[in-house]
Each structure stands twice: as structure tokens, then as C-alpha cells.
Image (cartoon, rainbow, N blue to C red):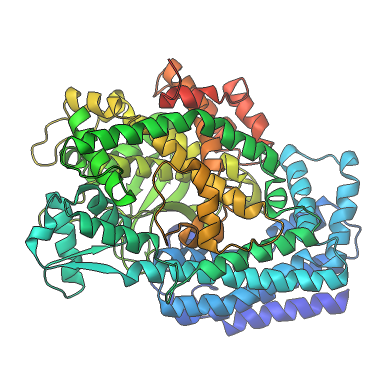
Amino acid sequence: MRNRMTAAAATLALITSCNMENPLLTESQCPYGAPQFDKIRHEHYLPAFKAGIEEAKAEIDAIVANPEAPDFENTIEALEYSGRTLDRVSGIFYNLMEAETDEQMQAIAEEVSPLMTEYSMYVSLNKPLFERVKAVYEKRDSLDLAQDQKQLLEDTYKSFARNGANLSDEDKAVYSKYAEELSLATLQFSKNVLAATNAYTLHITDSADLAGLPGYVVDMAALAAKEKGMDGWVITLDYPSFGPFMKYSDVRDLRKEVYMAYMTRSVGGEYDNTGIVRKIVDLRIKMSSLLGYGTYADYALENKMAKNAATVNSFLNELLVPSLPFAKKEVAEILEYAKTHGFEGDRLESWDFSYWSEKYKEAEYALNDELLKPYFRLEDCIDAVFDLAGRLYGLTFTEISGVPVYHKDVKVYDVKDENGRHMALFYADFFPRPGKSGGAWMTAFREQSICNGVEERPFISIVTNFTKPTENAPSLLTHGEFTTFLHEFGHSLHGILAEGRYSSLTGTSVPRDFVELPSQIMENWAYEPEYLDTFAKDYRTGEVIPDSLITKIVASKNFLAGYSQVRQLQYGIMDMAWHTLKALPDDSTVDFEKKTMAPVDVMPPVSGTAFSPTFSHIFAGGYAAGYYSYKWAEVLEADAFSLFKEKGIFNKEVAASFRDNILSKGSTEDVAVLYKRFRGHNPQPEALMEKLGLVKK
């Protein structure tokens, strides 16, 4: 034991001495120990990963070599606290891979991927380590453990079992090979989506082709052209450009061109993902089979609220059946409206639906993005979102300038509670750029934890792709973008308000079908007049948003509710179709998707298109066999928000209960128990259908 510990100590000393100048490995002098983004360079990442892995392995070796009998502290807790340097490096690198990447970063990721996979296998397939974990687990009933310790022990043992610890040595080698291949395949999938998105531009030089586009879309297109050194206007496949173009362009041929480019981004060509989809699915089938599961969905759902594929499929169907008639009726209404307003044809194509539904919405509710955007200046929305966190949870957000950022657009805020306690650093990155993935998300550079009696508060980040300021106007959000802001901020609150000892159990470290509850419940405030009245002012005049507009926002809340619900359910159905396979189908990726979607399509299929090759949530993110969780969480949030509606949307008692039972608890207890403790009963699915107005009268 003495020799092994000496070797481990020597390894750590060597790592430290060799990397004194690496800002990823040296102690940060920034406020609260924030990442030293101003000093981090590409060449620092690979040495930092290698050093972090060596340090983590030495810590694992020390646990294994401990001559004392395994107990909770020297095995389970020691394992939880191992690899903190590696966690820090990973937390920075992989987040920037999504928010600020380039070809060099992607090359580093490809080199790091097998190293990380090998380290993961070094832990999860470590027989003597697992024997120590198992020894503690088998005497769990006789241990005097706190609730969070019981949960950590349970999760640790299951994690080993679910990652191959019980496999034979031969099967462990095969499992490791599959894991490495899967890691590289998902990385390539993500790389292709980003490259394909950036590869396309619609270059407009004739102003007649701008017909129908609002001023802010034209300004944004002009700015995009200027940034690319081109004249005229440029439309890209980034959603702030693509979405409004599809919604407003009067030029049908161009709408079709842009739609086809978007829906075939990684179907064939240089950035083809159709084969990679099949490879990822095949590897997941093989890995789950090796572990003794019938399908990958059986494996993935075991530790979720839903527990199994049968429950998920039943849940999706329970929402789909009553929603389909509403969706089909809505599509028919849009078609009828289009026909009476100049559309020639018997059916709407996918590149028509957004355009004509927006026209119908304007006619029905006298409401559109152009009308609302002046009331949602980004700076005002930021203040409003922070104010809501203050009214509900007593938080304050103060922008600080002494913390380095990874891009000039990023802002940093010091978050404190009502007693002045530092809760988190909050990074906000709002605007699109070439090295940034599309969409919006929340993440963390560091999770909350307490180690050796010292608490580390989290570094939380929100990343979006909102419309950039132009030469003629500030950044103005659509109401939908403001709702997205609230959604991601809900995730952020889950991280900011985390309380606990173990980062694997705090903040957003909860089952996938529970993690969207804190985010989706926040969206409700976007439709509350009592809240909108507090901040929505015309940035040009200072005029408070008229009651008539708020009434229209609320009235239009469930516009296309059936169609939108079916679209979300289709993604969940496609996800489950891929991940309940026991073998790859003979059909191509495109054909398999087409067959799966045929019974639930409400729009005519478009030949050659597919969304699976860009479905990053399930093929490059953490939502494989888990996309249903968005709808699952919608049921939770509809039921939960009804308590705010009953008691008051700013009610501090309800907010305190939500904070104490949901936001601060993470997964230190069974989340179903936590939810019931907050709400007083199990979630009620009818709450969602009633909220969406999808109930037969």
C-alpha cells in the first residue's frame, strides 16, 4: 500500500510541477475562483485533460489501495470527490465546444474523446473498486446514513452495474470498444450539424425578394451580409434568421429553398449524418444488449420517473390520441384561410404552414412579432427576469466586470440571496455567431458541492441565439424568445439554488423527465398580465404595453396548441422508435423516419427530408429515449403552476415551497416524493390538456 500511495503522490507532484502555467490547472485568482477565460488558450486543453485524468486515476488507485475496510466515507464519498480537476477542465472545454468552437477545438475534442472514454472505463470497469462499492452497498441497511448519503450510495452502485461492472473481462473489453466508438460518433454527429448549418446561405441581391419581411428581419439579413463581406442581404439556417424568414417571406420559391436546405442539412453530402445515426443506434443496441437489457430504451429509462418504455409509449399515446383531431382541424382552418386569401392549391406544404398560420394569427388576433417586439427589448427582459427571481426567491443579480469571459458578448452577474449570501456566478451569452450551436440551453462551468467542509457555489451559464442589435434597433425579442429566456432561466435557478454536499445529486442532476419542470413552469409567467405590466414598455416611447395587446397575447396562447403538441409528440415518438429497436432496420434513416411518422403526420411528407440527422437532443445530447420528458414535465408544470394560480403568481409561500422541495433538493430524494411533497398529490395529466384547451366541450 505504501508503495502505491507513494507512486500516486509522485504522479500528482509531477503533474503540478509540469503545469504551473496552465490556467486550467492553476488556482484561479478571479472572483469566487471563476474560470480564467482570459488566459486559457487552445494549447492548454490537451495537457490539462491528460493531467486531470492522471490525477483522477491516482485518486481511484488510492481508494482501491486503502487497507481499511470499505465504508461510506473511504469509498463512496471518496469516489464522489475524485476527479475534481478533470471535472473543472471538462466543464470548461465541453461547454465552449457548444458556445465558442472552431476547427481546432473540434480536433482537440476528437483527440480527447478516447482518453475520456478510457478513463471512464478505468473507473466503471475497475473490478477491485466495484468490489469495495458493492461491499458498502450490501450492508446499506445497517449503516447510519443521512438521506443524501443513502441516495449517493444507491446511485453509485447502480452506476457501476449500468456501466458494465458485472460483465466478464471479455465483455468489458467489448463494452469499452463500443463506448469509445459511440463517443466519437456522437461528436462527429454534432460537428456535422454545426458545419451543415453554417455551410448554407441564401444571398439576396434583389430587394423584391425581401417582400413580406419585417424591418428587423431585413436589418438582421443586411448585418449578416456585412459580416460576411457580401452586398445585399443574407439569410442563414441559424434559427433567428431561418424562423422569421419562413414565417414572413412572401416569396414562396425562396421559402421552399430555405426549408429544403434546413431539412436536408445533414442528409447526404459532405456533412451527412444518416449513416452516423444508424451507427449510434447500432452501438446503443449492442451496449444495452451486452448489459442484459432488451432495448436501449429499457436501459435508459430504468432510472427515470417513467421507468420503462411501455409507460412512455402509453403516455405519448394518451396525449396524442385526443390531440390529433385538434391538430388536423387547425391545419384545415389554416388551409381554408389561405385559399380565401390568394393561395392556389389543395394542400399546404411544410414551407407554407408557418407563413399562412402567421397570416391567420394576425387576422384572428391582430397580433404579430413585429407589433410586440418593441415591448421586449433584451435589456428590459433581462431586468424583468431577474426581478421575477427576486420577487419569488429573494435573489439579486449584479453585473460585474472583474470576471473574464470567453467572448465579448458574454455578461457575468454575481447572484446573492436576500441575506447577501453569494449563490452563484451567472454567465449570459445571448447572440448567435458561427462557432455557436443553434438553439438555447443552460449549463454549468462548475456545480455546487461541499468538499472537506468547504462549499463551492456554482458557475451557471445561459446560452441563446437571440436577434442581435442592428444599426437601426437594439436587440428586440419576440414573445416566443422571451418565453425561451424564461425557460432556460428556470434551469438556471435549479442550478443557482442548489444546496447539498454532492454535485452528482444537486442542481439539475435529476432524472431527465424531471429536469424540465423548473424550466417549463417559468414559461407561464410570459402570459401573466400582472407580470407583463411590470416591464413591457415600448423602447422608443416608454409607453407601457397596452392592456389590449396583453389580452391578445393571452388569447393567442393556445393558438395551434393541438398542432404544436402533436409536433412535440412526434419527436418523442421518433426517439422511442429508434431506441426500442433490437436490430437495425433494413430501411434507410430517411425511410425509417418516414414510415414511423406516417401515422402521426398532420402535414404532407416532403421527399428526401428528415429531422433525425439533425436531432441533436437524442444523437449528440442526453435525451436518447428521453425526449418524451419535455411533455412529461409539461404535465408536472401545468399541475404545479395551478397552485401559483390559486395562491397568487408571486406568492412567496408557494415559491418557498417550490424552492425547498424542488429547486434546492436536486435528486437527494426520489423526485416523485419531492413533487408530491410540494403539490400535495401526484401529477395530474388532465391539467395539461385543460391548460392547452385540448378538451372536448
At 88% from the left and 73% from the top, the residue drawn is 1
Q: Position of residue 540 (x, y in %)?
A: 9, 41
At 88% from the left and 57% from the top, the residue drawn is 70
Residue 449 shows in the view: no
The front one of 171 and 334 is 334
Q: Is residue 483 above or below residue 101?
A: above
Please tell me how many numbered marks the rendered image carries. Answer: 0
Q: Position of residue 268 (x, y in %)?
A: 45, 71
At 68% from the left and 43% from the top, the residue drawn is 309
Q: Is residue 97 above or below residue 246?
A: below
Q: Is residue 157 left or right of residue 613?
A: right
Q: Is residue 661 left or right of residue 126?
A: left
At 82% from the left and 51% from the top, the residue drawn is 72
- Point out the image quarter for the C terminus: top left
The front one of 451 and 70 is 70
Quadrant in the picture for residue 391: top left
Q: Position of residue 122 (x, y in %)?
A: 75, 71
Q: Is residue 296 left or right of residue 21?
A: right
Quadrant in the picture for residue 539: top left
